[in-house]
Image (tube, coloured by chain):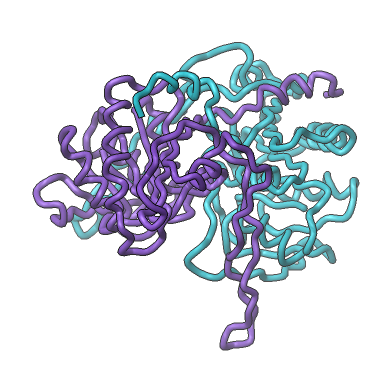
Chain colours: A purple, B cyan
Amino acid sequence: MVTNDDGISAKGIRTLYETVREFGDVVMVAPDSPQSGMGHAITIHHPLRLNPTDIYGDITALACTGTPVDCVKLAIYEVMKRKPDLLVSGINHGYNTATNVLYSGTMSAAVEGAMEGIPAIGFSLGAFEADADFSGTVDVVRTVVQEVLDKGVQEGVCLNVNIPPISAGPVKGIKVCRQAHAYWADRFENRLDQFGKPYYWLSGDFEDQQPADDTDLHWIEEGYATVVPTQFDLTSYSAIKDLENWEL
Amino acid sequence: MVTNDDGISAKGIRTLYETVREFGDVVMVAPDSPQSGMGHAITIHHPLRLNPTDIYGDITALACTGTPVDCVKLAIYEVMKRKPDLLVSGINHGYNTATNVLYSGTMSAAVEGAMEGIPAIGFSLGAFEADADFSGTVDVVRTVVQEVLDKGVQEGVCLNVNIPPISAGPVKGIKVCRQAHAYWADRFENRLDQFGKPYYWLSGDFEDQQPADDTDLHWIEEGYATVVPTQFDLTSYSAIKDLENWEL
């Protein structure tokens, strides 16, 4: 199964589809419009539609009115009526490194796959442009997909793969590492509209809070693609110990 | 700072406000409409509004057109222009146990607080009704808030607090525990609309995949409120070791 968060007609999902079709039959269920920043959102308060498209020839390719996580749920429970052998999400236009994994619709689709027990991988390229050059991603996607199909991933885990842009030179290799502790130092564009009423539009700079040489941000800086195994158990087991002396 | 995902006029946030105002000055920035299931979504593609309300007397209480995470960002960077001493989110109408933490706007607001280095707590009551009885939550909220203010929480962690409904009898106590490995066995209501076109509406049953006696679902079943320390580092460190033998 193939999905993404940039929308079913994005260049990144086309690249992903064209690479993974070598491995088996593809079903695509992806948002009909950009869903960047939707995180793990699901649609509860209104119904969803699945509109067939023929932009990928004769494979099943459905444009969904919902979020990336909605796409995964609909694909499994309404379209395929079974769990796929592999779920791939992306290729995102823009990195999903560090804590961006929480905001990312691309990665939330992969996490949802892991929750369903499906081997799942989210792919992202370090270039935002709609016409970004995805040629440097093909080898990385092929290598990671082959390893996941051969060796599987442990229960409760999916993979977050980030790939540097071709403008940074050839990819030097693929590193398994941890999520950096970085976050958005947010700013808002705070302006008055044409009626004199204020509005706020999210902006901001991404800052590495604790630079270290075992993180995705570090290895990308060094010219490598990165693989962060990503889990949906958010429990802090070390904090459970800290809380033992609380008076509750 | 007080926020939620059910909307600024929900009974749960009023209860939370009335309980935490004993501890200090309150600023409220909360969604102007229900945002359940929005997860860690942020609004990128359009601007946001903050509309003042006086439903909480003369405190700053702003109804935001965005998601719960948008509310946290706006409160810090545009309203308070500093980080609050404490962020509380909720009280959600309905549990946010187990993997629901990923779908929950209430908990995503608390996780966003942790990412900003703010002591943060999400509260949820096991009753969905708009007029649910929140009287059983007051002692739990007061106890947990007091402990967080006294002892702090470790970096990178917030607290996920779930409280059984009054209909289950008096709360027996408060247990620190881990997130259960449960998930939604999803179904969709698949119908035809009045024009004969299909639509899909999310439904489903929540199932505990691996029942165990150290989880939030277990202790709630036993009549306790639960505290799960929740982190934003999704790296699976055990899986990093597994991947060492991969050919990448």
- Quarter of the figure that contains the C terminus of chain B: top left
Residue ID at (35%, 54%):
A166
The image position of residue A4, as x and y in percent, is 34, 48
Does residue B210 lie above or below A90 as drawn?
Answer: above
The image position of residue B39, as x and y in percent, is 53, 45
Q: Nearer the viewer, residue B244 or B67?
A: B244
Q: In the rendered view, does B9 fall on the left or right side of A162?
A: right
- Name the residue at the left extreme: A58
Residue ID at (83%, 64%):
B57
Residue ID at (83%, 24%):
A248
Q: In the rendered view, does A121 fall on the left or right side of A135?
A: right
Q: Quadrant of residue A24?
A: top left
Q: Quadrant of residue B186?
A: top left
| Residue B202 at least partly seen | no
Q: Nearer the viewer, residue B98 or A139?
A: A139
Count of numbered labels shown in the rendering: 0
Q: Quadrant of residue A20?
A: top left
Does residue A204 lie above or below A1 as drawn?
Answer: below
The image position of residue A187, as x and y in percent, is 65, 65
| Residue A197 at least partly seen | yes
The image position of residue B88, as x and y in percent, is 74, 45
Residue ID at (78%, 34%):
B153
Q: Nearer the viewer, residue B150 or B212?
A: B150
